[in-house]
Image: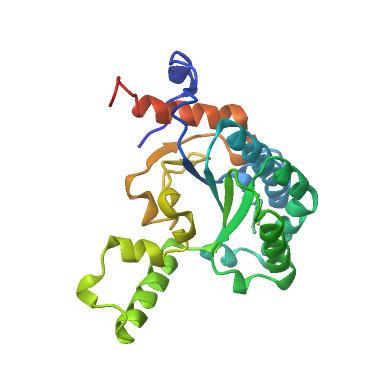
Amino acid sequence: MFSKPKETVADQPALDLANIPAHIAIIMDGNGRWAKARHLPRVAGHQQGMQTVKKVTIEASRLGVKVLTLYAFSTENWKRPSSEVNFLMQLPIKFFDTFVPELIENNVRVMVMGDLTALPAPTQAVVKKAMAQTAACTGMVLNFALNYGGRAELVRAAQALARQVEQGALAAEAIDEAHFEQALMTAPLGELAAPDLLIRTSGEERLSNFMLWQVAYSEFVFLDEHWPDFDGASLRHAIEVFQHRHRRFGGL
Ligand SMILES: CCc1cc(N2CCCCCC2)n2ncc(-c3ccc(F)cc3)c2n1
């Protein structure tokens, strides 16, 4: 459950491009602390954090990651000051205003999971438009968790299955893990729904209600750097830690 200090990985073999985790999920933490350390307003950390999203998206795609899930806004984030929430709701608009051409150029498809109906209409519109514009891309899936909560996702899945039982379409005794996975927001990802690697920045070692079902067998790598300081080298470092735990000895 502990990330290795960078120096211990330096003496490991370089990145094994044949063992890149297919699905990487990231809890992008530390934006406010990054800003505070620089005597900047919190929103400056969020703005810089968005630039990091762009850098990491391109590097993950270049490395051959198949799904990159980013925890952008949790159901708990609504409790923040309205001024900060309003700024955060503008970030998807700013992100896609400048980044859709580069996403398409890199064959990256945008997907979103969460309750989008609660987001402001302009935010919903730009997200739906970006998903439509990148729908034909067949490369990496960039999956944003937006107004997402792991417990809410499980309750929503249980309600969907209960409705099927009520309608006589499903016997309660027949419900198994596959039925649950089909009712989760990650169902469209199929076999790639479960993150192989979960990264959390800024030193916190908690799940914070993120992908509770899907991370049952994920490797967790916790890094001390704040999200705005995270970059391609940080991503490669986290993957090397993952690979060091998943060493392949011959045909294993
Ligand atoms: C809605 C809150 C939020 C916050 C945020 N931050 C602030 C906090 C986390 C660190 C990253 C920068 N980003 N960065 C990209 C997006 C984004 C979300 C959906 C989408 F389809 C495209 C882009 C984003 N969304």
* Residue situated in front as seen by the camera: 227 or 242: 242
Residue 251 in percent (x, y) is at 29, 24
Residue 72 in percent (x, y) is at 59, 54
- Report the number of discs: 0
The residue drawn where x is 67% and y is 37% is 55
Q: If the image is split into quadrants, where does the C terminus sit?
A: top left
Which colour scheme appears in the figure?
rainbow
Q: If the image is split into quadrants, where does the N terminus sit?
A: top left
* Residue situated in front as seen by the camera: 243 or 33: 243
Whether residue 230 appears in this view of the structure is no
**Residue at the bottom extreme?**
167
In the image: residue 156, left or right of residue 34: left
Residue 25 in percent (x, y) is at 49, 45
* Residue situated in front as seen by the camera: 201 or 33: 201
The relative height of residue 64 versus residue 109 in the rendered view (above or below) is above
**Residue at the top extreme?**
11
**Residue at the right extreme?**
98
> In terms of image quadrants, where is residue 196?
top left
> In terms of image quadrants, where is residue 205?
top left
Residue 200 in percent (x, y) is at 49, 42
The relative height of residue 171 versus residue 153 in the rendered view (above or below) is below
The residue drawn where x is 38% and y is 53% is 214
The relative height of residue 23 versus residue 136 in the rendered view (above or below) is above
> In terms of image quadrants, where is residue 247?
top left
Whether residue 67 appears in this view of the structure is yes
* Residue situated in front as seen by the camera: 87 or 103: 103
